[in-house]
Amino acid sequence: MDKTIKLRVKKEIDQSREFKVLKLKGSLITRGFTEIIHIEDENEDFYINSFSTSYKHKKEADDFILDYISLNNLTETITLLSPINSNS
């Protein structure tokens, strides 16, 4: 059964952060966590990026995302909305 992972991404960001966000999305695809990432407006300030991954890869994907956010100083730019222990 697939699990959905959601990220809240700030809309107004500089070019450097935008590149890092794109690199994260590309990494999620190349690492095999998903094949497509859906993007929708949440409000005037944020996008919601969501993707489905297999149940067995959910924790690994969550950990990868949290590490990436921390290592690339993106805590003000990206928020993981689905907690690691979530059933969603």
Image (tube, rainbow, N blue to C red):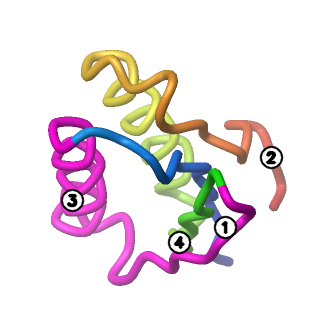
Toward which corner of the image does residue 37 lie, by quadrant? bottom left
Residue 59 is marked as: none
Toward which corner of the image does residue 30 lie, by quadrant? bottom left
Q: Inspect the image, locate mark 4, and give the three-letter code of the amino acid beneath it.
A: Phe
Residue that protrudes farthest toward the right in the picture: 87
Q: Is residue 5 left or right of residue 69?
A: right
Whichever of callouts 4 and 1 sits on the residue coming sooner in the sequence is: 1
Residue 51 is marked as: 4
Q: Which residue is mark 2?
A: 86
Q: Residue 73 in the image: x percent, y percent?
A: 33, 17
Q: Quadrant of the C terminus?
A: bottom right
Whichever of callouts 3 and 2 sits on the residue coming sooner in the sequence is: 3
The magenta stretch is 15-44
Please say if 24 is above or below 2: above
Mark 4, other Cα within 10 Å: few <14 / some 14–19 / many ≥20:
some
Whichever of callouts 1 and 2 sits on the residue coming sooner in the sequence is: 1
- Determine whether the residue tagged by mark 3 lies in a helix, strand or loop: loop
Q: Residue at x 38, y 17 (%)?
A: 70
Marks 1 and 2, how far apart in space? Answer: 9 Å
Q: Residue at x 18, y 44 (%)?
A: 15
Q: Label 3 near label 4: C-beta < 8 Å?
A: no
Q: Residue 23 in the image: x percent, y percent?
A: 18, 51
Q: Label 2 near label 1: C-beta < 8 Å?
A: yes
Marks 4 and 3, how far apart in space? Answer: 13 Å
Marks 1 and 3, how far apart in space? Answer: 16 Å
